[in-house]
Image (cartoon, rainbow, N blue to C red):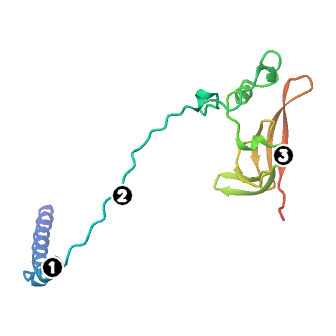
Amino acid sequence: MMKLRVQTDNTLKILFCMLFAIFQSGCTSTDTTGLENELSKIMSRPGGLIEPLPEIKPYEAYTYQSGLNGAHNPFKLFYVIKKTELGTDGLDDALTPEVEREIKNRNREELEAYELDSLRMVGTLDDDDDEWGIVLDPDGAVHRVSVGNYLGINIGKITHVYEDRIELREIIQNSDGRWEERKAALALIEIE
């Protein structure tokens, strides 16, 4: 039974190749007079002028030298907390090592330049597992924030984004100069 199937497969292959050759031969034409006439018309037309290529300006490499003149170096942290901001010894026993690293070793985000009271939550976006808050700053710019972003001048890290509010954890200095955590929220408001 198996041999019969192999012979049938070979027969089908041969038949297919023969049909393909027959169809291909029908597609070719030996009459090329129309093509030759069209080509002679095109060749008899006068040639046009080709515009010269535009002048290419050579590339000038830019070497960053602003850092040499005392300007801000873009490869260093924008804001470095001084030891006096972390208490007398530079460390604060009330904070976990993770929070201390968070305070010391990160660049500030744009919305940390504003007081939390001046920011307005104006909506939310939902994308599968991610919930985004829409925040309006005092200058009228709209920002999209999520868990892990920062708001306000008190190192306010977003912990949850809900439809009606954004919850965050702020780190503030108490009266004796020590750092402590507190919870804060930014409520949804309607804009007229």
Q: Which residue is rendered at x = 73% and y = 54% of the image?
A: 141
Mark 3 closeness class: few <14, some 14–19, many ≥20 residues within 10 Å: some
In the rendered structure, the answer to whether residue 53 lies left or right of residue 101 reads left
Precedes in sequence: disc 3 or disc 1: 1
Locate the C terminus and report the quarter of the image it occupies: bottom right
Using the image, tell me which numbered label, if any, was put on residue 54: 2
Q: Which residue is rendered at x = 36% and y = 57% of the image?
A: 54
Q: Residue under label 1, please give it.
A: 44
Q: Amino acid at mark 1?
A: Ser
Q: Amino acid at mark 2?
A: Pro
In the rendered structure, the answer to whether residue 173 lies left or right of residue 123 reads right
Q: Quadrant of residue 97?
A: top right
Viewer-proximal residue among 56 and 40:
56
Q: Are marks 2 and 3 in contact (CB under 8 Å)?
A: no
Precedes in sequence: disc 1 or disc 2: 1
The residue sitting at the right extreme is: 175
